[in-house]
Image: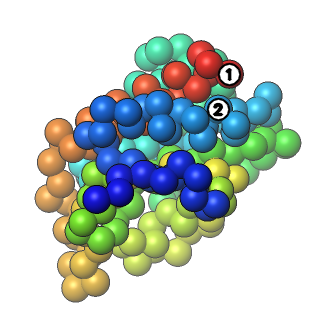
Amino acid sequence: MKKYNPLHPTGIQVHFTDENAPMVLCEMLKAHLLEQTIILCIGTDRCIGDALGPLVGTLLANKNFRYPLYGTLDDPIHAVNLESSLEKIKTEHPDAHIIAIDACLGQENLIGNIHIKKGPIYPGKGVGKSLPRVGHLSVVGIVDKLQNDDLYAIHHIRLSLIMHMAQIIADAFMLATYLS
């Protein structure tokens, strides 16, 4: 099974268990870490399946990540405050190049994959919410399968999966800043 395609025109994907995952993700991130880059980690710690973004934000903050960072476990950015957070970011960083990070739902065979692609994230789409699209580059982790009949399936995800995926994403960002 092909786990990633670094030459794919719309982005890359890699399973978090791939031993090369941080470096594969790092390669694409390096090209997108610009002087005006900010990192926007979306999600909430009130739902394990939606905690991927804030966990990545917290891991990066704890490592003194050098780019401006929004969305941590202590100060999450989620459906309730996304619009006001975006307004604040536009005021403080008018020319921001936003890299958005979020959990998402997808096909069962893709659970555990981390995707990076050019273009925005559509937060809340997998659980029926209509929120503003965010980002110039998207980093998403597929944390569970999309079930149209059960929008609350995301509440049954294991914390272990989310922690491992968050660590891989944070490691990739740290590698990208070190190597760029």
Locate the N terminus by quadrant. bottom left
Residue lying farthest to the right in this orientation: 95
Residue 65 vs 112, above or below: the answer is: above
Is residue 153 visible from the viewing direction of this image? yes
Q: Nearer the viewer, residue 150 or 79?
A: 150
Residue 165 vs 78, above or below: the answer is: above
Q: Residues within 10 Å of mark 1 (few under 14, many from 20)?
A: few
Tally of marks = 2
Q: Position of residue 52 (x, y in %)?
A: 36, 44
Classify mark 2: helix, strand or loop: helix
Classify mark 1: helix, strand or loop: loop
Give yes or no for contact between labels 2 and 1 (Cβ–Cβ under 8 Å): yes
Q: Position of residue 149 (x, y in %)?
A: 22, 85
Locate the C terminus by quadrant. top right
Determine whether, in the image, residue 47 is placed left or right of residue 102: left
Residue drawn at 34 percent across, 66 percent down: 105
Determine whether, in the image, residue 19 is placed left or right of residue 133: left
Is residue 72 visible from the viewing direction of this image? no
Q: Amino acid at mark 2?
A: Lys
Residue underneath mark 1: 180
